[in-house]
Structures are given as C-alpha cells and as structure tokens.
Amino acid sequence: TRFISTHPDQDHLQGLKYLDDNIDILNFYCVKNNVIKEDETEDFKHYCTLRDHNKKAFHIEKGSTRKWMNQTCEERGSAGIHVLWPITTDENFKSALMEAEQNGGSPNNISAVIRYSIENGVSVMWMGDLETDFLESIKDKIVWLETDIVFASHHGRDSGKIPEVVLSKIKPKIIVIGEAPSEHLNYYNNYNTITQNSAGDITLECAEKKVHIFVSSYDYSVDFLNNEYETGEDNYLGSLDV
C-alpha cells in the first residue's frame, strides 16, 4: 500500500489513523518536515509517526525516483507518479518550511506538486494547498506538462488560484474545485470544472485513452463529458477522452 501526503494540514489527514489501521500503510510518501502543531489531533500525531518512520517514510522532492513509483523492473511496471516540486534547496521553499516548523505558520506552501499518468491513459495533477503568491514565485522552476485533470490548489480558493501562465502550459481538460466555502472559491471561468461542494466524493476510473468519472451526489451533472453508459456504485457523471 502507498499513501501520498501533500502536506500536514488536518483537512488533508482526516481519517489517516483509521485508514492505516484498516489497510496497513507500508509506504508513506511526504515532504520531509518537522512541522508541529499547538493542538495535535489523533490524525496529526499518526502523520508524524508515519512521517518519521525509518522504514515506511519516503521523503519526496522534485525528481524523486523509486521502484515502483516511477521505475520499472522485470517484476512489475511503474505507477507513473512523478514529483514536480519541491526543490528542497530552493530559498522560497526553505522559507516556507521554516515558517511552518519554527513559527507555527501554515504548512500550505510546503505542499508537493505531483503528477500521475498512465500509459495510453489519463494524466492528473495535484498541488496540495499552494497559495497563489507562492505559485507565482516558483512557476518558472517547475516543468509544467499538459495534464488532463488538475485538482485546483487550496481547494480552488481565490487564495490558491493557479496563475494563468501555468494553466496555459498545463491545458487542463477538467479542473476539480475542492470543498471550501463557496464565497472563497474561484470557479475558473472558461475551463470545464467539477465542483466538489456539489458533486461530493469523486472517483476517477482510468481506462485506455479515457477516464470514467463517478460522483456521490445523484443531483449533480455536467454537460462536457461523453455518455458511455457506465455503471458503478456512485452516480456516473460521464467519460472524458484523453
């Protein structure tokens, strides 16, 4: 089992201990940090246990390689997971890390940027909770590849709006806007979006040259996906050709 943590915020760790108790996380990927919190939840304490584990923890940074994260062998193929950020020697990152570790600041800007892709299939990108100002400062230090589905940073809040120059390189077919108060959201006009506040849980079923998308809300719909009449446990939203 592999669990990838973008950064140690409670809303990104909720249920971590329960999950580990039930599936036994053997590989825990995270950015190396010593973040502490004044009010430590059970899940944050468990995050620290996994983060600091001498066997389970794998600390990720730009260009990280590992079997079978993104390396293949005769036994099995690559999972197609590539880390685009952080550069741990970068001054912007080091400043954000110091702020989170020593000053009790937000860990948002130590978030990893991770791209997942499968052969002849979909590509997906996560940016954690990186904030717009920070993204502006590092945008030229990341190789932004065209990516089919992008999860908007900071849940799609205005404070995490992905710079247009970055979006012009990624060329996303769908932007997923996370769960956050609607008055704080940027709805990314001129892009196809799925809004988690309304859609609920989102499942991406990856197939050859397409992805089938399911959501937990049966009242949610969009008009930009193909109908291939798929069935599943949740509401079939539609399929995206990639």
Image: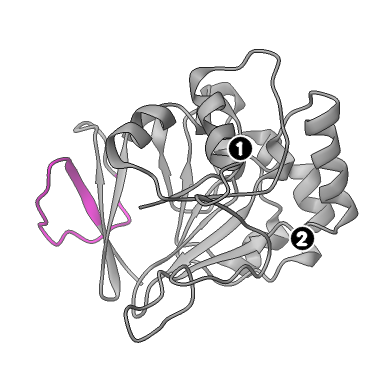
Q: Quadrant of residue 119?
A: bottom left
227 inside magenta stretch: yes
Residue 150 horizontal side relative to residue 198, left or right: right
* Range shown magenta: 222-238
Whether residue 13 is visible to the viewer of this picture, yes or no, is yes
Q: Nearer the viewer, mark 1 or mark 2?
A: 2
Residue receiving disc 2: 87
Q: Main secondary structure of the magenta part?
A: loop
Whether residue 186 is visible to the viewer of this picture, yes or no, is no
Looking at this view, name the residue that lies furthest to the bottom.
74
For badge 2, the amino acid type reads Ile
The residue nearer to you, when weighing 71 against 159, is: 71
Residue appearing at x 80%, y 41% in the figure? 97
What kind of element bears circle 1?
A: helix
| First along the sequence among labels 1 and 2 | 2
Q: Residue 190 at what x, y percent from top left?
A: 53, 53
